[in-house]
Image (cartoon, rainbow, N blue to C red):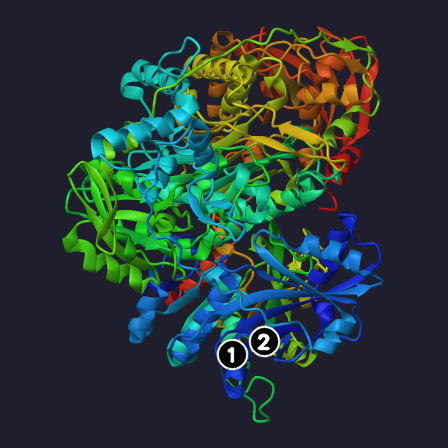
Amino acid sequence: MPHRLEIFYRDSGLDTRGGALAGRLGCLGAAAGLEAVYLSEVYTLEADYARAELEAVAALLANPVVHDCLIDEPRRLPVFAWAVEVGFLPGVTDNVAHTAAETIADAWNRPATPEGGVYSSRVYYLAGRLDETAARTLAGQLANPLIQRITVLSAAAYAAAGGLPTVIPRVRLDAGPMVTGVDLELSPAELAALGREGVLDHLDDAGRPVRRGPLALELDCLRAIAAYFREIEGRNPTDVELESIAQTWSEHCKHTIFAAAIGDVADGLYHRYIKGATREIRRRRGAGDICVSVFVDNAGAIVFDDDYLITDKVETHNSPSALDPFGGAITGIVGVNRDAMGFGLGAKPVLNRYGFCFADPRDDEPLFRSPGRENRTLSPRQIMDGVIEGVRVGGNCSGIPTTQGFMYFHPRFKGKPLVFVGTLGFIPRETAGRPSHEKAAMPGDLVVMTGGRVGLDGIHGATFSSEALTAGSPATAVQIGDPITQKKMSDCLVKEARDRCLYRSITDNGAGGLSCSVAEMARECGGCEVELDRVPTKYPGMAPWQIWISESQERMTLAVPPEKWDELRDLLASRGVEATAIGRFTAAGRCRVLWEGRPVMDMELDFLHHGLPARHLLIREPAAAPPPVELDPTMPPVDLLPALLGRLNLASQAFVSTQYDYEVQGGTVVKPLAGHNGIDNFATVIRPRLDSARGVAVTQALYPTYTELDPYAMAAATIDTAVRRLLAAGCPLEHIALLDNFCWCSSTDPERLWQLKECARACYDTAVAFGAPFISGKDSMFNDFSGFDADGRPVRISVPPTLLISGLGVVPDVVRVRPPGFQREEDEIFLCGPPAAEELGGAEGFELLKERCLGRGAGTVPRVDSARLLPFYRRMETLLADGRLRSILPLATGGLAAALGLAVMADGCGARVCLTGKVAPGIELLTETMGRFLVSVAPAEAAAVMAEIGSEFAVRLGMVTGDARLAVESAAGDIVADHAVVELLAAYRATFAGY
Amino acid sequence: MSIPLVLVLTGYGINCEEETAFAFERCGARARVMHVNDLIAAPRRLAEYQVLVFPGGFSYGDDTGSGNALANKLGHALGGELQAFVAADRLVLGICNGFQVLVNLGLLPGFAVRADGNPGARAGARLVALIPNARPRYECRWVRVAPAAECPCVFLRGMEPFAVPVAHGEGRFYAPPEVHARLAAERGIALRYCDAAGVLAGGRFPANPNGSLDDIAGITDSTGRVLGLMPHPERALLASHTPDWPRCRALSPGRWDDPGPGRQLFVNAVTYFTGG
């Protein structure tokens, strides 16, 4: 008989989680009548233990100082109305249960429950006047039905049944057809169905076909596959082969749109504009080239110093995060950590960063994936909370500082959020005399899988993220990460095994799982042969194709020389990490996969990697020109500054950054929050070497509201902002590199593709002009949602096409860094850069004016004249290197108004400034004209600094004051804004105060 | 006396071992990072060291309670060796998750055994707990802590209130009233959260970041040689660690490796052996 241990705080007053939860449910508007929430943790043990054994287990899992533990008996709370239990569905990663089982095993020196498992769940006892509908609504906020089960019992039913029922979420798989040949000689309609919905698995009881999930293969691809197997192999492909090709050819893995010929760009956007920019910059640099490994590995790498390289990679995890925000985000962050570990011979992750694009979390208008109010999507608030938490657990548990990040809000992120996650890695330039960024499997090396085990989680993740979200999006595409399993593996690989030369090559198991990682490494030597039945699985009954493409987390694939295998296996075992040799690398030119000795995949590597039919994408420039700007007032509203600083896109996001450990590893210099008052920093700096003054600065930039107006200008502005922020953080222009993440929508639409091309073209022009190479990137092309509103009307929501530019640069000595805020009374304030232009298109402040009906139209997006800016930037670089500035803050979203607000709020100094009058005051305050910095300088230095920058690029705005007020005058002498700093801070902090 | 050897444990999600070892080395010790399983495989090696450090981290992901699973593992495999180490004239430091491990191991509060037995007569009993923050979320922020007056703790000798970061989700110190009273009476309270002026936080957020009873940020045993604390002194070793670094450099010159506010704690540990 299974047993149930229920653990809770003896003094419920000590458990503040219930109160916080009640508060959060109140924010979600679901809690009318809810008075209190009491929590219990439950461990369900499948094995039949004696009472004494159960008491021993209870002593291990409960803390006698604060907890009580009930064994097989219901909790007797004096007051509650409903009991809600949330546990995991079968097969979903249950980290708490895993630790509990290990703890029991440690104590008893034997496996916890040889006959079965340990499962964790949580009970919420809801007190208050709640009817069943209310209770079920609340329960719906406590769990995600895609991965969790919910049991709801009234107090009466709970009492009658003697508590909640015991549930054992053990995976039970019916052994389905193991290997199937798939006939591709089908009608176009049948073939299209195969590509869209997947291989036919079986017929259900009613005789309807049940398919395995999307292959995301278009007709031309399926025809190429059919032709290959007909003509070269003389047979039909197996299901394993077809699934494997689908993974390898997916948009997610091969970036088919970025690689394809498009419009007049025959060599494709990626080759021409992204790699092309880097190629050109490296050529011009010659011996001064900072790039070491770009576009060829899991991450890109630049020189840090004589001894080390710094690597960087930014990923997106949009689709999984829409379905399961926590799981999507945590697998995103721990997944991109593996990109660092999988760089070269293995880099140590040293910094995490994030970027979240959400809809307004206060928007509670429901959306549905199916008609008839079925299949409701998660609300923006639920998505936001889950994503924040996922990155928190993933990053904090992995011991990687999360110093940099942002949230950005726009209504069009309601169908699908964007979740960017990035990781910097640190690796010696040489390991045991070999360059660390080079690696190659050799024929005869063992294929070794290490880390976690394989389960059904994450099947079809790669092909699924290449499609729009619909009702049929597979639940198995979501999964939960286990950061501790990965941390153990990471420590052992990059801190021990790498330096002992125990493997020759390494890569991450991400999209496509083994099918991609092994086949990718096989290119290094020319083939592989894998015995799939050796792969350790989480539970029995998985079919070969599932094992091969599963994206179960925290796994790396290694190429291990046979003579090193025993040593590596023993080392990993001594660190609590599993490793299994599952095959060999070969030089046969083929990817062979065996199941119980019989081949289930046997095809040419060349076709697998290069058989994808070439495409030529059409583009079309949209005809309509955006309407011009019309502004009502010559003067902005009196509350412009507080209103602007309280907007979602400018308000303090400290509640997110302080949930992330930004100090671990002991090298953080510029933190996520600046100044006494903790304003958000847009660039942060770490010292990855504990014994060195040298730093790495990171930043991010995006302007999604610019894209529809001018995609070229959008990309140029984004790159300019990233470069400028790194410059202000203390990086020389020569030591800056960029990463691109394109998150587009409807990428079969020629007009969207025209925007994409314009954006890529600007990437080339701007990056080359500034000499900042791209070193890595990733794209996500179908961020579209198709569903229904509450009245059953079809709704299609596409994200605004978004380019995220992530920048990194080296700071030669962290003594260079300067604060963003004003520091000392009487310091002089300068606005450096080109004069304000009438460029309100897409500006945050213009949105505010439009919402207040003070403006109309679209307007012009800021343009970047990089040739003109470059010499000015070099002068700024020199001033920073010489320590001549007291503070520096690059202007971006919110323009001068936001910059002034941030500069006074950071440390509470006041300022009195006068606008230049070149444009109307409202425009001067809100335009987002690029290339500008707000700086302050000690009075004695002011004249000299001004002279060095040159009057073309510097204008004196005013002076820092000691009265803790920000006063802004127009050139005509009118008061445009006058606020106490505390008033601005209150507005800045109010927006997310309850979060 | 000679340069102390410091053993810094790692494994199972511990993640502050490198910077903690660096802090000791920077202050004149020799530090070695060792995997928990390597120590379990050869427990007698513990006796070679003068200082044992349980660094910060997320052992076992905090599952089943922070520090619980690792304490269980260490207690079963090394309980005797750890008791012997503490009984010898050695130092033990637990930072953040390491503090949570020490209280779950029962090495802290480490009251002297009394004739009447209670509380804390039995070595290894858990008497205090570090529970989820009163504001139940992970908090990473800089705070100030004040060493308790007349505290015998070796690590805190001569230290004034200092700035130091905390980063934890379960750092709320709790002790039942009788244990708290004894802790106070026997000078076991080592560090308390305070405000910028050095005045005790009085339980108020954010000066007291987690709602700890009596503003307690760290405790020591009856000998003063075992210290557990939630804040991370190794992250306050150097001037460039402090959040004021960019402001200070705007106003005056300085070097990245000038002493930081937490450095003295490591110097004290080294000086205990070198006699400095």
Q: Which amino acid, by three-letter code, is at mark 2?
A: Leu
Q: Return the residue nearer the eye: A353 or A672.
A: A353
Q: Which amino acid, by three-letter code, is at mark 1?
A: Val
The residue pinned by badge 2 equals A5
Q: Please tell me whether mark 1 or mark 2 is closer to you in this view.
A: 2
Q: Chain of mark 1?
A: A
Dot 1: within a 10 Å radius of its alpha carbon, few (fewer than 14), some, or many (20 or more) residues? many
Spatial distance from mark 1 to mark 2, Cα to Cα? 9 Å
Q: Is residue A985 left or right of residue A812?
A: right
Seen in the picture, residue A455 relative to A10 is either above or below; the reply is above
Task: State the image quarter where residue A292 is shown.
Answer: top left
Q: Is residue A295 left or right of residue A900?
A: left
Have a look at marks 1 and 2 and say if they share a chain. yes
Q: Position of residue A73 (x, y in %)?
A: 65, 80
Residue drawn 22% across and 35% down?
A: A233
Q: Chain of mark 2?
A: A
Q: Position of residue A745 (x, y in %)?
A: 55, 25
The residue pinned by badge 1 equals A57
Residue drawn 41% across and 35% down?
A: A312
